[in-house]
Image: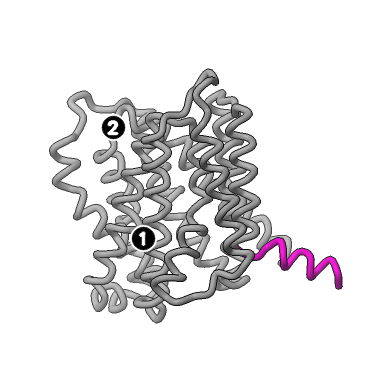
Amino acid sequence: MKTSHLIELLVLGAIWGASFMLMKSTVPAFGVFALVEVRAGVAALFLLPVVYFTRQWKDLSGNWAKLLFVGAINTAIPFCLFSYTSLHLDAGLSAILNGTAPMFGAIIAYFYLQDRIGVHGVIGTFLGFLGVVVISQDTQSASPVSLLPVVTALGATCCYGIAACFMKKHLSGVKPFAIAAGSQVFAALLLFPFALYAWPEVNPDASTWGAALVLAILCTGVAYIMYFDLIAKIGASQAMTVGYLVPMFGILWGMVVLGEVLSTYAMIGGSLIIIGLMVTTGILKRLRMKTSL
């Protein structure tokens, strides 16, 4: 991997890691549905010109039914679930739980796509969910963990796993920006009546609106462009290693900006999740092979 690609990967990890901090600071003012509507709607407006100028409009319009499902399962539902989670858990902890997405992806791919999990996949998945169990036992610290926000976070990552398998099977030939923009467009349309009903009575202040727009434009729109750019440059498997960076940056942003402190339970459980993620996705095996060479 070239230095420029590594820098881009680190920047993307920092951007996606910051999304948990931004959700934590904006959800109380907007509410769950209104914030996700702003995020998806503004991201859609940002991405649609990209679709037009890259001549991917036919891919979007020709696959609208499938993209409607992706918009629901990969954006609307998980964004709402993580927004709810952010009301109750620290941003760093939410970012750690986000790391379980590839584990759900491996499990769902086994049943839906008949992909093999293998011994490493089973061990990695076990370690990851053992980490979740450890985190859920933290009831003694200054910020005790309650079960429901953990479950909603896992529900969100399960949605990501379902969406990944669905896109692999049904949208493998569709252009990437069409998928990215289409998912945001249909998520915004699906959530509009809920957001309208639950729109906050007191309009959020300018700084909160600014944070929401950063969440929409930078952490969603720009992040998608960077991610697909990395896939084109270094391949999907290496681009997906950003998943290891997101929890790290999520913890860092939470500590630096929000003054969060990870409990012992969170550190142990988070370590198990990250190790499980590395085992499940085979990065430890690849590192050992490179070392042996």
User: Residue placed at 21% from the left, 24% from the top?
Assistant: 202
User: Is residue 146 placed above or below 158 in the rendered structure?
Assistant: above
Q: Nearer the viewer, mark 1 or mark 2?
A: 2
User: Residue placed at 25% from the left, 40% from the top?
Assistant: 33
Tell me the SS state at disc 2.
helix
Assess whether residue 289 is covered by the magenta stretch.
Answer: yes
User: Residue placed at 36% from the left, 60% from the top?
Assistant: 47
Q: Quadrant of residue 9?
A: bottom right
In the displayed structure, does residue 285 sit left or right of residue 293? left
Q: Earlier in the sequence, mark 1 or mark 2?
A: 2
Q: Quadrant of residue 214?
A: top left
Q: Which residue is mark 2?
A: 30
User: Is residue 1 placed above or below 152 in the rendered structure?
Assistant: below
Most prominent secondary structure in the magenta stretch? helix
Amino acid type at image mark 1: Leu
x, y percent for residue 76: 29, 52
User: Is residue 206 placed above or below 192 in the rendered structure?
Assistant: above
Could you classify mark 2 by the number of other residues whose Cα lies within 10 Å: few (under 14), some (14-19), or many (20 or more)?
many
Could you classify mark 1 by the number of other residues whose Cα lies within 10 Å: few (under 14), some (14-19), or many (20 or more)?
many
Label drawn at residue 128? none
- What is the C-alpha distance between the residues marked 1 and 2? 23 Å
Assess whether residue 272 is covered by the magenta stretch.
Answer: no
Marks 1 and 2: CB-CB under 8 Å? no
Tell me the SS state at disc 1.
helix
- For the residue pair 79 and 16, the one nearer the viewer reads as 79
In the displayed structure, does residue 86 sit left or right of residue 10? left
Read off the magenta span.
Answer: 281-293
x, y percent for residue 232: 55, 73
In the displayed structure, does residue 200 sit left or right of residue 258? left
Q: Which residue is mark 1?
A: 47
User: Residue placed at 30% from the left, 56% from the top?
Assistant: 45
Q: Residue furthest top?
A: 142
